[in-house]
Amino acid sequence: MELHTCLWSEVAAFDFDKSDFQRLRAAFPDMTLKVHENAESFLSSADHVEHLLTWEFPEDWYSKCPKLKQIMTPAAGRDWIAPDPNGKVNVIHGTFHGEIMAESMLGALLYMNHQMPSMQRNHASRGWDRNLQKDARLLRHQRVLIIGFGSIGRVCGQLISGTGAEVIGVRRTNAGMENGMQVVTTDRLVELLPTADHVVLVLPGDTSTDNFLTTDMIRLCKPGVYLYNFGRGNALTTDTVMKVIDEIGGAFLDVTDEEPLPEDSPLWQQPNVMITPHSSCIYQDYKTCFVEEVISRLT
Amino acid sequence: MELHTCLWSEVAAFDFDKSDFQRLRAAFPDMTLKVHENAESFLSSADHVEHLLTWEFPEDWYSKCPKLKQIMTPAAGRDWIAPDPNGKVNVIHGTFHGEIMAESMLGALLYMNHQMPSMQRNHASRGWDRNLQKDARLLRHQRVLIIGFGSIGRVCGQLISGTGAEVIGVRRTNAGMENGMQVVTTDRLVELLPTADHVVLVLPGDTSTDNFLTTDMIRLCKPGVYLYNFGRGNALTTDTVMKVIDEIGGAFLDVTDEEPLPEDSPLWQQPNVMITPHSSCIYQDYKTCFVEEVISRLT
């Protein structure tokens, strides 16, 4: 078997080079591995590629790859691989993101819940104000709503419920119980938002999720609710956050409606907003998790 | 029964007033509760006090309280209640701190592990640098040493192991397994420090723990180790931290050898140090947890 890779990236944690594939080569000593470092290199071999690991695949590449059978991509989002116009190529997305994002998300919840934005200011002013955190309440006594409860949301929910917090998953279809967590459908949001202490978005980025969390919905929540976006920025706009900024406890945004978030965005200067640069999965483990997943799929 | 309280504090989260005792009154409708707001008020009743809830009890109060039978204090540390010179008064310390400190400690671990000091700088500069976190590794694949593994350390270890991290408890005596965690005695530190990714101190503040974690011990650790102090500041001095500052990944200090940490301390300006003002237990739940504990002891 011959396996091609197009897994370069400007983000170091996502930039696979030859050394990242040692485990793969060891697992399949008879396999030929062609690690491409740019599109030109890949396209010069395109006519005989059958199996491909890639970050991106534009639609016009399909006609250049007549023998292509399957694409495996580390990406969780559906943003980068165009669908096959002929519907023949099998596209497999990585499913390992939950366990990485779960740590980022739990960290974000504890960050906001422990009033770390205030603690940052206390540190920056070399202060010792022991009353800045007086309104903090244990996460274990609170309710966390995770909106977008697919494979990622479920693993995140599992880790968060380990603190004792009550996690409720929200998704389009399939209500029920899952690993001890209640899962409800989106039509119940109006009833649930007023009971949530933390509302976490893990929604995919298609147009159906544009402006999903509206100011009206946020105003149904408890005053002082904490908002989190770990899905895609389109679901919670800058405009929405700014309109409710004085009514919420704060927002931890790993994704924003424009990325990079412009320097003149009003979000940067809000004392109760923390922004990370779409980095919830930026861990060294990302590459090893993907390689392990490729091995298990090819075995 | 008559119960007296001396539970005023400058820290709002620790300042009990009448409203905090509603649950207690409801549980014991026949009890007389005397809530004192200062030492003078208490001392004027001292001669007939039998049962006392208090933050502090100086030694010379014992002679003023001839009928005193028991003291219950919310404090975990042994710093504030003088021992009874006659050895007759039963002093009971709160045992609820673990579940509060566990959230602060897990938050601190995820904070350092997710490279949040770098993320703070990224935010402050309105940047979008997705390579600042490139060395991050999942906590679940790492080893955490908790030095000081009494009732608090054990509960913290339990929560941290929920992430999948390997937690090893270290204490003076009683090696063995506890709730799936390995517990070793301090004589094994020399062998264990080189294997730890995170070293957390939860030691009490008596003189036997002065300068417990020395520069020599820290230099046994992996380069890039993260240090945490959630016990008392005497165990890890400013001087020690400053000597190893370029060899460690960072330090999260909730306690320091001088408190408040002086404005001119060099710790404040280290990019890999985060300081919180001895606030790991500053949660609204503190007062309710203590009241619940008093109820269960009096029942």
Image: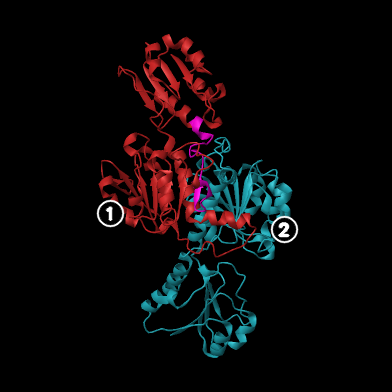
Chain colours: A red, B cyan
Left or right? Give the position of A110 relative to A87.
right
Q: What mark, if any, has residue B264 been given in the picture?
A: 2
Q: Pick the residue in front: A218 or B183.
A: A218
Q: In the image, what residue occupies the spot 48% across and 22% down?
A: A27
Q: In the image, what residue occupies the spot 52% across and 36% down?
A: A283
Kindly identify the amino acid type of the residue bearing the numbered disc 1: Glu
Say which chain tag 2 marks: B
Q: Pick the residue in front: A286 or B95.
A: A286
**Residue A37 is covered by the magenta coloring:** no
**Which residue reaches farthest front?**
A264
Kindly identify the amino acid type of the residue bearing the numbered disc 2: Asp
In the image, are marks 2 and 1 on the same chain? no
Count of labels in the image: 2
Q: Pick the residue in front: B261 or A79.
A: A79
Q: Which residues are magenta?
A: A267-288
Tell me if label 2 and label 1 are in contact, CB under 8 Å.
Answer: no
Say which chain tag 1 marks: A
Cα distance, mark 2 to mark 1?
52 Å
Q: Position of residue A82 (x, y in %)?
A: 37, 23
Local packing at callout 2 (Cα closer than 10 Å; few below 14, some 14-19, many 20+) is: few
Kindly indicate the quadrant of the structure image that contains residue A220: bottom left
- Residue to which mark 1 is pinned: A191
Q: In the image, what residue occupies the spot 47% across and 32% down?
A: A289
Q: Position of residue B261 (x, y in %)?
A: 67, 61
Kindly tell me whether residue A159 is visible in this rendering: no
